[in-house]
Image (tube, coloured by chain):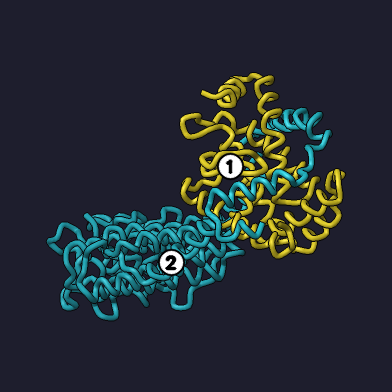
Amino acid sequence: MTPLEELAQRTADGDRDAFAEIYGTLLDPIYRYLYWNMWSRDDAEDLAEEVFLKCLVNIGGYDAKRGPFKAWAFRIAHNLLVDHQRRRGRRGQEELKESIEDDKSPAPESLEDDERARALRECLEGLPSKQRQVVAMKYFADMSNAEVAKALGRSEGAVNALQHRALRHLGKMLEEQGWK
Amino acid sequence: MASMRGAGKEELETAAAAFLAQVATPAVPARLKDYGLQRVWARADTLEEAKAPAPARRVYRNPALLRHVLVIGLVVLMVLLVSSTGAYAFSYNSQPDSPLYGAKIFFERARVTLTPSSVEDIRLEMSYSERRMEELQSMVASGNQEGSDRWLREYRRNVEGAGVLFEAISTQETEQLSLQFQEMLDQQEHMMQGMRHGQPSGLSGSIDGAYQVCDGERMRMRRRCGQETPGDPSQQPGEPQRKGNCPETEGSSMQAELPSSSGARPVDDSAPTGGAYTPTDPSQTTGSPANGTTGSTVIETGSPVNESASPVNESGQDLEGMGYQGDSPHRGYLP
């Protein structure tokens, strides 16, 4: 049993410190995953809090035999993200665009970093949501293909295929924007 | 990046990873890092507390559940309404041998129970007794004696029920109604006399029973209205028949319903049937109203026969000696 699974067990037994450790370990990858799917720091922050709340409330139902805890937590994050995007879709895309434009990215170290981030965001926007989620989990949340597969409820082969297509699309779009 | 196109999967991955690694990812906000966990714990505690609400209140708090309960309630109500309406409609013309007859009686009793006015109750009981007569006619026409016991029970309930209500209400209120009731009883008696012939034993027994009920109730009505019967001990010899405070029935001399016109009478004293009412051959009867007193309330108001306190027929024969039982409902046609 890896530390995260142990910590989950201890949390389920009422150990608050164990959950604090989980929070410290998973906050960063979950936040980044959400951010690169929502492009809004406020929304990502709110949703990250929701993810940890759901984790804590449902941690008694986690079964280590069915997969790693990280994949379980990302599954929750993925579901919440899909719900959020569905609600957003109902409210219309205008609001989404505004939130993207209003959002202030972290102070770039250089102009090139800023432009790189902006270009990646635009390219990710052009990807189908499944491919975008695979890329976000794999490259921003530092997850293995097996964990991504568990989190998205797909087979590892399907995740590999999604990742392959996503990278191809991404490469093509970046090339069209002049990134080499 | 151009080299990425057409390259293998590993190369693509490596190139993308290299590009992505160079992208500045926003750091987790300090607010989330420092206070996020506390907020999560606080919200989890709140959820825990709200987890066990009272089940009864949950219905009111949950609009969806409340809607379901309301929908189910409405459906049940509709089903009850449709089924009761259907039962009423289908049972309306049912006969005593029908399984729906119980429903018909139930609706009748329910209507009587729900009617607040006693006068209206009397009217209902009267109309239901007319219905019973229609049922009897159907049974007689088809020769079907099944359910005749039940029919008799219901007929008794209608007629006696009306009588009890008459007792409870002041005479002035029901003056006209009592007149109608007596006329109705006269007609029903007359009908039963006509229907008695050639029926199966079960049905004729029920008709006999109904005849007794009808006759007994008529006698009670007469007493109530002050129209004394021949066996009334308070009636002095030679005293004219008292009219009482009820209006006199037009043709209430009972002669109308007597079998005298046809020569038949309810009871043939000489009948070897042990006293059961057997319509007799006209030739065997005298056709005298006085003789009829043994079988029915053969009281012609003001008739000389009634002027005697003792039930004596025209020929001076003491009727008591012939089995006359005065006011008893078991008169003439009973042992």
Residue labelled with disc 1: A75
The chain displayed cyan equals B
In this view, the residue in front, A35 or B128, is A35
- The local secondary structure at tag 2 comes to helix
x then y, percent, for residue B84: 45, 62
Which amino acid type is shown beneath numbered disc 2? Answer: Tyr
Residue labelled with disc 2: B88
Residue shown at 55%/54% (left/top)? Answer: A164
Q: Is residue B241 visible?
A: no
Residue shown at 64%/31% (left/top)? Answer: A56
x then y, percent, for residue B251: 44, 78
* Location of residue A107 (image quadrant): top right
Chain A display color: yellow
x then y, percent, for residue A77: 64, 42
Q: Residue furthest left?
A: B272
Residue shown at 34%/69% (left/top)? Answer: B94
Q: Which mark is residue B137?
A: none
Q: Is residue B213 visible?
A: yes
Q: Chain of mark 2?
A: B
